[in-house]
Structure formats: structure tokens, C-alpha cells
Image: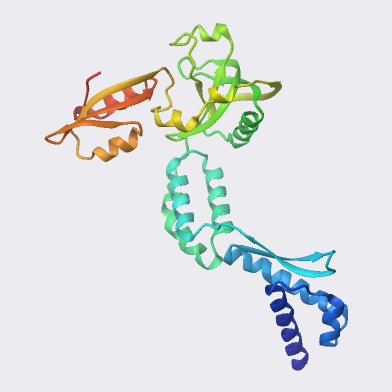
């Protein structure tokens, strides 16, 4: 029995070596070489497949034994899959928890899936321990709304250039209004996901701070009470496309409005924190630790941010 087991091991290793060398493994030929029937060779191939599936989780390389009809035999097909490292998974878990963007049930599910899928079993306990305190004390957003399915619908509408119709809870008067919009981007900022969209309705545009505003309106996705993706399509020329990356650099607290330039003096301890907060900021001058800074921004959110800095910031224009 032991000899038969050793024979099987030697046979599997021989077949596996041929596959690694890029050679074709033919069942009839291998059966003749090892003095076994073709069913035994098929079982060996299946054992190799099982091993490769387990190995993929550790190496990030997906190797598959496939049958090549042209060459009438099995060959090895490799796909190199980028794999998150343990530190990367830990960093993503920390960022997710700090975002406080989801209800606790959804957050826990996402983190568990991320760890189970991306971290080797031997390291899963350590990663879970490193985030356990934050996970235990996690404070979910006050809206307590599950919105990921809606966000995915909006993503599909953006991709397909479909109009969407939504019932939206306004902040200022707590009334629900119906809007038909052109969705162009989904963005995240300070605890919330937002939809940026354009409105065609002239009656609605009357309430805008800027008439015929060429910039999108911003909606918090958790405040969308009802959503319908319409069959009607819209078209935005490539030259006029909305670029959320550029918009994101110029908006504070996701307050919409016109594009403007601001100039201020900063006398605080860390100018890098200001430059990180305002990606478009440029230092115009520095004297005795006081910086003159200029930035290009959208909307009124910049006013809120400047006031929040207290005495260390003085607006000049």
C-alpha cells in the first residue's frame, strides 16, 4: 500500500513538472509511461487542479490545468492576479472604519469579507485584533440608511448616460422634492457619498444662486428616498465632460456653487496640512512664518472651512 502511495506521489510530481515546463500532458501517453489506466491519470490531474486552487490564495498566481483540444492534452495556464498585502488590507480596514460612511451591519460585513478574501488564514487573527477596538466602538451615521444598491444603480446610470428621477429629502426645509437629472459622478467626502448631476428643469434652476449654473448640483445619496433609472438617455460632448477629479480638488464640504479664487494669510504651525486640504493652493509669499496662500475653489464650502480655522487664517479676498 505504501509503495502504491509513493508511486502515486511520484506520478503526480512527474505530471506537475511537465505542466510547469509548458509541456502537453496526454492521458493515454502518461498511462502507458506509468503503467496505469487513463482514469488514474485523470484523478492525478484533478488532484493537481485542487492543489493549484489552494495555492492561488497564497501566491496571487492563478494556475489552471486546461484541456487543449488542438493538442489533445492538458496544459498549464497562468494568470497573475495582483494581490493585496497584509499591510494594505489593514490600511483599507482602518480607512473604512474612519470613514463612518455605512451602517454598522454593512461595515462589519465588508471588513469581514475583505479580510477573508485577501488575508492568509494564518494572519487573519492579527488583522482582526488590530482593528477590533475601532470596530467595537464604531459609530454609524445618524441617517442609518442602507444605500449601496442605490449607489450601484446610479453608477450604472452614469455609465449608460441615463436620466434618473428621484425623490430627494432637502436639507433646508426637510421637504421631499422630485428631480429629473443627468447623473455624472459619485463622490465621497466627510462621512457621506454624493451624486453630482445636472438639472435641465428651468423652473428648478430659478432657485439657483447662479442662474444657468454650468456646474453640477450635489445630492447626498443617503437622502434619496426613491430612485428610478429612466430609459431616456442624455449626451454630453467629450470636451464638456464632467471631471470629478478636478472638481474634487476645488470643492470643500461638498457645497456647490461658482468657481472662485480665494486669498488668505496662514499663521498656523503646519502649512502642509493646508496644502493637503486645498489641493489647488499655492504659496504666494512667506514672511516670519506667516504664509500668503491662493486657491481656486467651488462654492461656499470654503467660507465654512476658513471660519473653522480661527485666528490662524485671515481672508484677504
Q: Residue 17: x percent and y percent?
A: 69, 78
The colour style of the image is rainbow
Q: Residue at x 75, y 69 (%)?
A: 75
Q: Residue at x 80, y 65 (%)?
A: 67
Q: Quadrant of the N terminus?
A: bottom right
Q: Residue 278: x percent and y percent?
A: 34, 32
Q: Residue at x 84, y 76 (%)?
A: 27
Visible residue check, residue 142? no
Q: Nearer the viewer, residue 55 or 14?
A: 14
Placement of 86 over or under 237, stated as above or below: below
Q: Quadrant of the C terminus?
A: top left
Q: How many marks?
A: 0
Q: Nearer the viewer, residue 29 or 300?
A: 29
Residue 306 is left or right of residue 301, and the answer is left
Residue 145 is left or right of residue 48, and the answer is left
Q: Quadrant of residue 262?
A: top left
Q: Quadrant of residue 149?
A: top right
Q: Residue 44: x percent and y percent?
A: 78, 77
Q: Nearer the viewer, residue 27 or 140?
A: 27
Q: Quadrant of residue 43?
A: bottom right
Visible residue check, residue 171? yes
The single residue placed furthest to the left in the displayed view is: 288
Q: Residue 225: x percent and y percent?
A: 60, 24
Placement of 212 over or under 14, stated as above or below: above
Placement of 2 over or under 28, stated as above or below: below
Amino acid at each position: 500500500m505504501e509503495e502504491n502511495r509513493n508511486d502515486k506521489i511520484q506520478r503526480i510530481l512527474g505530471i506537475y513538472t511537465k505542466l510547469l515546463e509548458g509541456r502537453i500532458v496526454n492521458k493515454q501517453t502518461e498511462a502507458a509511461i506509468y503503467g496505469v489506466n487513463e482514469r488514474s491519470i485523470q484523478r492525478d490531474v484533478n488532484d493537481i487542479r485542487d492543489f493549484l486552487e489552494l495555492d492561488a490564495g497564497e501566491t496571487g498566481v492563478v494556475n489552471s490545468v486546461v484541456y487543449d483540444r488542438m493538442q489533445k492534452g492538458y496544459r498549464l495556464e497562468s494568470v497573475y492576479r495582483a494581490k493585496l498585502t497584509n499591510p494594505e488590507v489593514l490600511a483599507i480596514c482602518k480607512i473604512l472604519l474612519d470613514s463612518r460612511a455605512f451602517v454598522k451591519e454593512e461595515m462589519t460585513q465588508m471588513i469581514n469579507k475583505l479580510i477573508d478574501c485577501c488575508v492568509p488564514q494564518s494572519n487573519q487573527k492579527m488583522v482582526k485584533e488590530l482593528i477590533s477596538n475601532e470596530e467595537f466602538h464604531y459609530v454609524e451615521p445618524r441617517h442609518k440608511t442602507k444605500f449601496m444598491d442605490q449607489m450601484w444603480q446610479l453608477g450604472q446610470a452614469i455609465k449608460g448616460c441615463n436620466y434618473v428621477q428621484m425623490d430627494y429629502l432637502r436639507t433646508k426645509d426637510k421637504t421631499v422634492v422630485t428631480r429629473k437629472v443627468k447623473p455624472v459622478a459619485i463622490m465621497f467626502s466627510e462621512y457621506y457619498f454624493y451624486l453630482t448631476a445636472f438639472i435641465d428643469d428651468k423652473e428648478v434652476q430659478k432657485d439657483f444662486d447662479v442662474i444657468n449654473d454650468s456646474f453640477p448640483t450635489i445630492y447626498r445619496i443617503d437622502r434619496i428616498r426613491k430612485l428610478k433609472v429612466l430609459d431616456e438617455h442624455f449626451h454630453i460632448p467629450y470636451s464638456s465632460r464632467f471631471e470629478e477629479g478636478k472638481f474634487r480638488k476645488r470643492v470643500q464640504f461638498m457645497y456647490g456653487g461658482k468657481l472662485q479664487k480665494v486669498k488668505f494669510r496662514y499663521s498656523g504651525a503646519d502649512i502642509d496640512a493646508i496644502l493637503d486640504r486645498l489641493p489647488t493652493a499655492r504659496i504666494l509669499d512667506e514672511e516670519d512664518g506667516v504664509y500668503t496662500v491662493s486657491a481656486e475653489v467651488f462654492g461656499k464650502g470654503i467660507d465654512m472651512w476658513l471660519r473653522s480655522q480661527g485666528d490662524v487664517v485671515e481672508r484677504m479676498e
